[in-house]
Amino acid sequence: MYDFAYHRPTNLADAARLAKEAEAKLMAGGMTLIPTLKQRLAKPSAVIDLGAISDLVGIRVEGGRLTIGALTTHADVARSAEVRRTIPGLADLANGIGDPQVRNRGTIGGSLANNDPAADYPAAVLGLGATIQTNERSIAADDYFKGLFETALKEGEIITAVHFPIPEKAAYAKFPNPASRYAIIGVFIAKGPQGVRVAVTGAGNGVFRVKAMEDALAKNWSADAINDITVPASECNSDIHASSEYRAHLIGVMAKRAIQAAG
Amino acid sequence: MPHVSLTVNGKPASADVENRTLLVQLLREKLGLTGTHVGCDTSQCGACVVHVNGRSVKSCTILAVQCEGANVTTIEGLATDGKLHPMQEAFRENHGLQCGFCTPGMVMSALDLVKHNPDPSEREVREWLEGNLCRCTGYHNIVKSILAGAAAMRGQPTKAAAE
């Protein structure tokens, strides 16, 4: 690891000021950043650790939506009675990320800022039509994800919370890589205030929606409704873990499992 | 040079570190606590699991400077007055270790499980061990040990494990 300056601000204003520095890198749980630094794949001038900003931690339900602070760990989301009561599929998703030690450190804000193409949270955020709150603005999920590790966040912009509309039904089904537990394919399906939404992670360069499945499920909420709907293999990645054809096939399988789990 | 002060196994500890120093390096190289092992150094194997503020973490994937003021427990902090912790004793009794390299991480991970789930099923133990690898592949007795350790911590006599 190359050395770097280290800052641990205790409030958002200080963090935002420090983040403006060229080559500075924000760190939430560090579950991706620290391994990246260890491999010398990044060389930030400074690491700004958000871990001491307690305002960014917490889960609450108000105004018909579930709000999760950006620094809330996967373990806390998985164990939260509020999440379990309002969006159990989201608690299940959090409980399937990585391993227990990753879940004890990794955060929802960190996952979304990183936007790994095989991460789980992007599927939930897009599938539920959530809103990403930053220190500067609110960003709708449909406008947030911009492809491989790319998001609508500007340099130094900090996610503070994620607001989830509470759905009538929702579930996530994942075919995990057996070693990393990243999604080879993960499908989040929700039926809620914004209609039916189907979001797929792990398939391509970033999370995406499958409009044909959404339309079919809006007419007929059952696994059979999407029997004949496929995502073209040309839209899926191929790597040592799965071919593009296999990934395309898994989207259908995981989508059906998600519908069945959602009930 | 940054200076870190924290509590390790109930005692105050401090050391000069670099910003890039990992917690596991602080523990092993500065504080001499070599019971915490470095297996893969890529956050996969779990040999380096310790508790930070009561939660199991991979000490190869957290910076020492992030642990300023933290309360850290390592495998060395479990035994009291020369008596093994019930989870350690269960590993000894059930042959839960072969080469022993992964054992400190297994024990520390197991204690985090039992804290949230005092009476885990075999399946729950196996799922929990997602982040702990045993290259001897001795999982059978590791799982047996954790079930026995959990029972002992609940104050129940250990049952003979079904073979």
Image (cartoon, coloured by chain):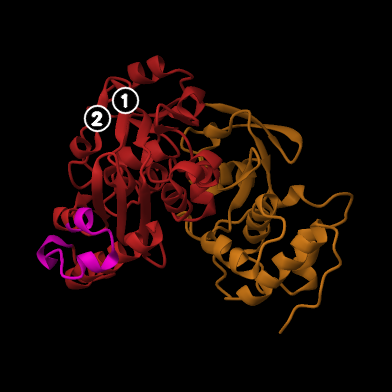
Chain colours: A red, B orange
| Real-space Cα separation, disc 2 to disc 1, in angstroms | 8 Å
| Quadrant position of the C terminus of chain A in the picture | bottom left
One can see residue A41 in this view: no
Q: Is residue B95 left or right of residue A70?
A: right
* Residue type, numbered disc 2: Ile
Q: Comparing marks 2 and 1, which lies closer to the viewer?
A: 2
Q: Label 2: which residue?
A: A139
- Label drawn at residue A149: none
Report if the CB atoms under discs 2 and 1 are less than 8 Å apart.
yes
* Residue type, numbered disc 1: Thr
The residue that appears at 28% across and 25% down in the rendered structure is A157
Q: Label 1: which residue?
A: A134
- Say which chain tag 1 marks: A
* Total labels drawn: 2
Classed neighbour count for the residue bearing mark 1: other residues with Cα under 10 Å, few (<14), some (14–19), many (≥20): some
Question: Could you say where residue A46 lies in the image, as x and y percent from the top left?
Answer: 36, 28
Tell me the magenta residue range.
Answer: A216-236
Q: Secondary structure at mark 2?
A: strand
N-terminal label among 2 and 1 = 1
Q: Secondary structure at mark 1?
A: strand
Question: Could you say where residue B81 lies in the image, as x and y percent from the top left?
Answer: 89, 49
